Image (cartoon, grey):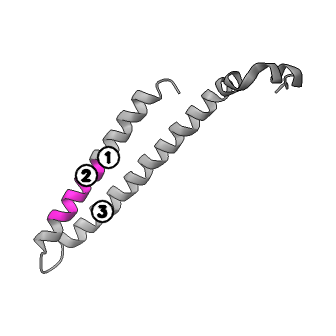
Amino acid sequence: MKLIPYKDALKMGKEKLDATLAAPRAHRAKKQAELEVAKLDEDIATKKATLQEVCSEKDLDFSQIIGLQDTIALTERKKRQFNKIISEMFPGV
């Protein structure tokens, strides 16, 4: 990477410097959003495993089953929303 002369950097101004950082910042933000999606994936898998355990118990707790189903559905909805946000806010990034 070639450095720009200091006097040219001073002439650029804050707006120009911010513009040069826009692409890396967008890339970082997209990666942060993708990390959140990965966390949601892990959460969904964990809750589905818990649901299977609850459904295989001798005495079924239907309130707990319903609660887990609702929680899984909400988390899956959040994941879909995150993916939609990523595709809309970061096209081509």
Label 1 neighbour load within 10 Å: few <14, some 14-19, many 20+:
some
The residue drawn where x is 38% and y is 52% is: 40
Query: Looking at the figure, which quarter contains the N terminus?
Result: top right
Viewer-nearest residue: 53 or 27: 27
How many numbered tags mark residues here? 3
Kindly identify which numbered label has been placed on residue 78: 1
Amino acid type at circle 2 is Leu
Whole-percent x, y for residue 52 in the image: 23, 66
Residues drawn in magenta: 66-76
The residue drawn where x is 85% and y is 26% is: 3
Q: Main secondary structure of the magenta part?
A: helix
Quadrant location of residue 45?
Answer: bottom left
Horizontal side of residue 28 vs 51, given as left or right: right
Horizontal side of residue 21 vs 51, given as left or right: right
SS state under label 1: helix
Question: Badges 1 and 2: C-beta atoms under 8 Å apart?
Answer: yes
SS state under label 2: helix
Quadrant location of residue 22?
Answer: top right
The residue singled out by tag 3 in the image is 47
Kindly identify which numbered label has been placed on residue 74: 2
The residue drawn where x is 23% and y is 52% is: 73
Whole-percent x, y for residue 16 in the image: 69, 21
Label 1 to label 3, Cα distance in Å?
14 Å
Whole-percent x, y for residue 93 in the image: 53, 27
Report the mark closest to the observer, 3 or 2. 2
Q: Is residue 6 above or below residue 63?
A: above
Amino acid type at circle 3 is Lys
Label 1 to label 2, Cα distance in Å?
6 Å
Label 3 to label 2, Cα distance in Å?
11 Å
